[in-house]
Image: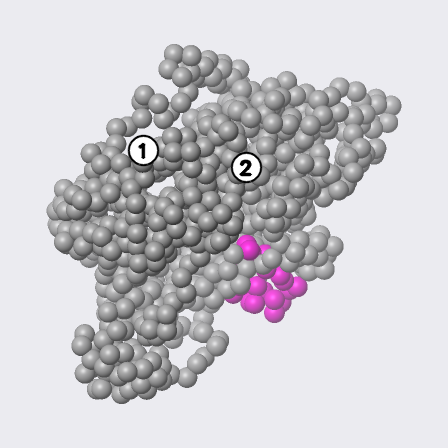
Amino acid sequence: MATSEADGDIDWPFLAEGLLERREYQFQLAQAALRDHTLVCLPTGLGKTTVSLLVTARRLHDVGGTSLLLAPTKPLVSQHADFYREALAEVPDDEIVVFTGEVRPAKRADLWEEARVVVATPQVVENDLVGNRISLSRVTHCTFDECHRATGDYAYNYIAERYHEDAEEPLVTGMSASPGDDEEAILQVCENLGIHDVEVMTEDDADVAEHTHETTVEWERVDLPETVEEIRDAINEIVRQRLTRLKELGVTNKTSPDVSEREIQRIQGQLRDLMNNDQSEGYEGMSMLAEVRKLRTAVTYVETQSVESFRRYMERQKEAARSSGASKADQRMVSEPKVREAVRKARDYDDLHPKFRRARMLIAETLGINDGERVILFTESRDTAEALTDFLGAHFETQKFVGQSDTDGSEGMTQTEQQETLDRFRAGEFEVLVSTSVAEEGLDVPEVDLVLFYEPVPTAIRSIQRKGRTGRQTEGAVTVLLAEDTRDEAYFWKARRDEKEMEQQLRSLKNVAGEIEGELSEQAGLAAYEDDEGGNDDSAGDAPQESEEATSGTTAGNDGQAGLDAFAGKAVEKKDESGGGDDGEDETEDGDGVVAEAGTDDEAVEIVVDQRELDSSIARDLSTRDGIETRLETLEVGDYVLSDRVVVERKTVADFLDTLTGGDRSMFEQVGDAARHYARPVVVVEGENLYGERNVHPKAIHGALASLAVDFGASVMRTSDEAETADLLETVAEREQDDGGREVSVHGEKQSKTLTEQQEYVVASIAEVGPVTARSLLAEFGSVEAVMTAEEDDLQEAEGVGAVTAERIREVTGSSYDGSE
């Protein structure tokens, strides 16, 4: 490492002169991160991104290639890109590119080829890897910002696996102020990212301490008004009644409304066991438990947020209960007299939660008496954020800061709006920023005088992230509002305990970093040994055996259905109503009907995946397998295309049963589209307990399966989970392309609805009306217009239409429109 001792300037390749303040601890961490795949733990606000920048600059200078920096949110990606463009003097700005969902996939593929530094959200990179739009082979440094997210199915894990497999000279840097709640969690993050070294700096280190300032934390307790307590107690009484019933079913001995989430999960597990044994108590209990969960959420809203937030939540539940296919839990909850009375009290309550006034007072003290300049107020609920912005806006210059997704009754902020809001906050154009969790992680929010928590945060990681918004340049203050005798208390004590444990873990982690590195190395060595012994192909040898039903391709009650044997050897001629088949229009020489055709090389088997299937792990799984090449497209027909004649429609057991219980006929429409355009349509029903998950008569399930096979000519196959589905797709694709010599061709369009189908759709869209009732009404009245203008008594003349349905139809068609709702 070279630094100029005379004036403190930084002498480091590729960096702009005079931009960075010289901090020795950052250089120490960068030197360590250059030696091996490293987890860098550094308190919030002390320049983790600078450490990554130093490593990136050195790697670009010494090794070349491309640097990839991943960050969990779009605003954070934009912030990092701006910093890198300013700091990397030797890299032209147009070679530092941003990859988010707002950049078209085709453009990303072109930008990737010329980029020296790519700053991206992980979901976009994951999609591009699955779709084979980019290659990580020449990436010489990959940074995982806020790497504590590398758990479960988060995109970081998949990207790290691909990076270590594909890159010629990989180097990983993970960055977090709070890598995990305990040593086990930290080890898991390291394992998921392929990290071997752990470097920790705390505020106890001399080099770090000179750049930190003390932050005081205070807890302000408030009492709930009597009416709020009455609303809460009424809801809790229903929770107690439902838990009492669950106790009678023998799945719990707890009846207190403040039952822990751990106990709720334990109850759910016992109920699932009952359902697997086809015991009716399991179905009844699961419905009760669903109601308990919703009611507990309602209590949290009224206790810790505001009565208005509670009212909005219950209105959403009421709408859900009135929709087609609503659950019994929803319907039972909103019709419960005590719940209805609580909602009535909430509508009549015109006062504010006491936290509102306390927040206003604390902000006034900070900005007025103490001559402060900026305050951030964090809240969990967007409803509360908007209400606070309106309330505080009458007294201070206030702006909200929320995520990009739209929610019921609330529009999100675009990335541009988010960036403009932060720029204005930094420039001092307003004093108070009211934010949801989107501003917690890593975002370069300016130094503030007060961080105000509207409610305690139940996890140490999030608490630490929020507190990091203050105390960077001068002494800072954090205040947590806490409603007495509410869930706030539980969250407060949990976060406080976990935070202390995390601080201790970081200190101990610093002391035992060598031991952890040894354990990580031992794990890596064991994995290598296992690879040498048994190979690394999960699909060979040790794969679970397919069930007889899956391998034969037969549907229960339909022994004559075509299965996997339909793909073997010589194709069996198939004709359908459209005249399609092996020699049908999808194989014409001029490519009529072909929307897109993806080419394959001589070695790889290609599977085309619909973009919407990325919610599952199947495409990611397939993309990591030897000899499989995945492509992403927005498919008009099917979920997976395996050849010019085979398309697969995948349905989970829950999706399949929704078709039978909710009146949604989309599955049959989708399979019909597949049968019209592909000679061999396949339906995969994925999951366990098809006949026991819901209280659906086996004959109804048999009928649906038979319809798919007989009416649409589809092969119906069963798999137990996503991994087994991936195995099946690989097998069929190999048989089609390797053994059968067929190529992949994506074709077909969804069939437009006929006039009759459109009429049925319009009537069926009214809550309480399904497809069957819609057809009955249209048969009775002759047109959509006649149905919509009929009186309640006349509506009840149609078969299957009762008083409730008739009333709902008249309410929807006859009420005045209120666009403000």
**Dot 1 corresponds to which residue?**
569
Compared to 818, does 698 lie above or below? above
Q: Give the residue at x 41% y 30%.
A: 738
Q: Nearer the viewer, mark 2 or mark 1?
A: 1
Query: Residue 447: image x %, image y %?
Result: 68, 46
Most foreground residue, 471 or 552: 552
Relative to residue 302, is residue 23 drawn left or right?
right
Residue 739, picture quadrant: top left
Where residue 691 appears, as percent x and y from the top left, is 18, 47
Q: Could you tell whether 368 is left or right of 646 in the image?
A: right
Report the amino acid beneath label 1. Answer: Gly
**First in sequence: mark 2 or mark 1?**
2
Which residues, given as a range, are shown in magenta? 384-404
Q: Toward the viewer: 59 or 715?
A: 715
Residue at screen point 33% across, 80% down: 784
Secondary structure beneath dot 1 equals loop
What's the residue at 27%, 87% (across, down)?
791
